[in-house]
Amino acid sequence: MDERLPVDEPAYVISVAARLVSLHPQTLRYYERLGLVKPTRTEGRIRLYSRRNIETLRKIARLTDDLGVNLAGVEVIMNMTQRVAELQQELDAQRESAKQEIERLHRRIQYLEEILGSALPQPVINVSATEVPPTEQMGGQGKGRRER
């Protein structure tokens, strides 16, 4: 059996759906045969059109009437639109996963820095002027440098 509509989801029989989108009921049946719209069915096989089905029918009408797209083109557009939406969801999921991995790695780096910081002695640099060679005290004039 076909998918069921949620109990709180409005459903329209074919005559009402056709009126809502200004199409003939036979046109809706034809679109269903082509696979452009998939209404659910009752136990008695009566077609029930959801809000989403109505939106799809309106989109088909816009594409055919306003833009002059034939039904084969409508099918391609609808399939591509669906595929783009699926790819966007995948991209969003991967972006979220990458973001979580970056946060995990930042926490790991912070943890390792804390461990290393507490485990290693801090170097103490205490250099007095007497320990620095005279050439370095005078601005670096010495071996390997030419005077100008």
Image (cartoon, grey):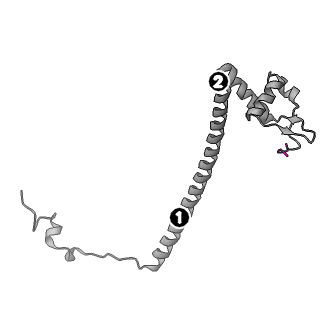
Magenta segment, principal secondary structure? loop
Per the model, the C-alpha gap separating discs 2 and 1 is: 50 Å
**Closer to viewer: mark 2 or mark 1:** 2
- 3 is within the stretch colored magenta: yes
Residue beneath the point at 78% across and 28% down: 30
Inspect the image, locate mark 2, and give the three-letter code of the amino acid beneath it.
Answer: Val
Residue 118, image x, y percentages? 48, 77
Q: Nearer the viewer, residue 101 or 76?
A: 76
**Secondary structure of the residue carrying numbered label 2:** loop
- Image height of 43 relative to 148, above or below: above
- 54 is within the stretch colored magenta: no
Residue beneath the point at 11% across and 64% down: 141
Q: Which mark is residue 65?
A: none
| Residue position for label 2 | 69
Q: Which residues are magenta?
A: 1-5
- Image height of 48 relative to 97, above or below: above
Q: Is residue 20 visible?
A: no
Q: Which mark is residue 105?
A: 1
Residue 56, image x, y percentages? 74, 32
Inspect the image, locate mark 1, and give the three-letter code of the amino acid beneath it.
Answer: Leu
Q: Is residue 105 left or right of residue 122?
A: right
Q: Nearer the viewer, residue 147 or 130?
A: 147
Residue 73, image x, y percentages? 63, 29
Please tell me how crowded label 2 is: few (under 14), some (14-19), or many (20+) other residues with Cα within 10 Å: some
**Secondary structure of the residue carrying numbered label 1:** helix
Q: Is residue 134 left or right of residue 54?
A: left
Q: Nearer the viewer, residue 52 or 95?
A: 52
Quadrant of the rendered structure where residue 18 is?
A: top right
Residue beneath the point at 83% across and 34% down: 49
Q: Earlier in the sequence, mark 2 or mark 1?
A: 2
Q: Is residue 40 left or right of residue 107?
A: right
Residue 17, image x, y percentages? 84, 28
